[in-house]
Image: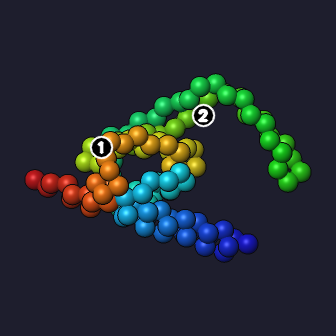
Amino acid sequence: MLVLVLALAGCATMRGRDQLRDGLLTMGIPQSSFLEVWGMPDQTYVTSGQDIMEAGWNQGSGSFFRGKRTFEVWKYESKKTELIFDRRKNLAAWKTNATVKELATPTPEPKRE
């Protein structure tokens, strides 16, 4: 079972890298894919959402959450893009003024002095 979970996680990461190279943003792309394809973000910070309440039932047990969810925000100036990641470190939302072609353009290497 563990091997199956690791294989699926590896496939998700590989699919995420391929989508980023093609300039496509989709929910669920892992943070690690952005690091591999776009490099380190120019700016990061943590923000929280509004108060929420949710309950669920899964495999014979219930869950309940009340509070604020926290999100990690990454900014890439060269891509004109802000990314929002959930607690699982997967892409939850984004804001961009870039085209698919601009997002597919390789990220320039940082200048070393």
Going by the picture, which residue comes out furthest to the right? 60
Please identify the quadrant where the N terminus is shown.
bottom right
Q: Position of residue 96 (x, y in %)?
A: 36, 42
Task: Residue type at mark 2: give it.
Answer: Arg
**Disc 2 designates what residue?**
69
Q: Is residue 5 above or below residue 68?
A: below
Residue at 21% in and 59% down = 109
Q: Say which label, 2 or 1, has the lower sequence index.
A: 2
Q: CA distance from mark 2 to mark 1?
A: 25 Å
Q: Is residue 87 left or right of residue 3?
A: left
Q: Secondary structure at mark 2?
A: strand
Q: Residue at x 10, y 53 (%)?
A: 113
As helix, strand or loop, the secondary structure at mark 1 comes to: loop
Asked if marks 2 and 1 touch (Cβ < 8 Å), the reply is no
Left/right of residue 81 with respect to residue 107 in the rendered view: right
- Mark 1 packing: few (<14 Cα in 10 Å), some, or many (20+)? some
**Where residue 69 appears, x then y in whole percent?**
60, 34
Q: How is the model colour-coded?
A: rainbow
Q: Is residue 85 visible?
A: yes
Q: Which residue is mark 1?
A: 80
> Residue, x 61% and y 29% (percent of image)?
68
The answer to which quarter of the image holds residue 59 is bottom right
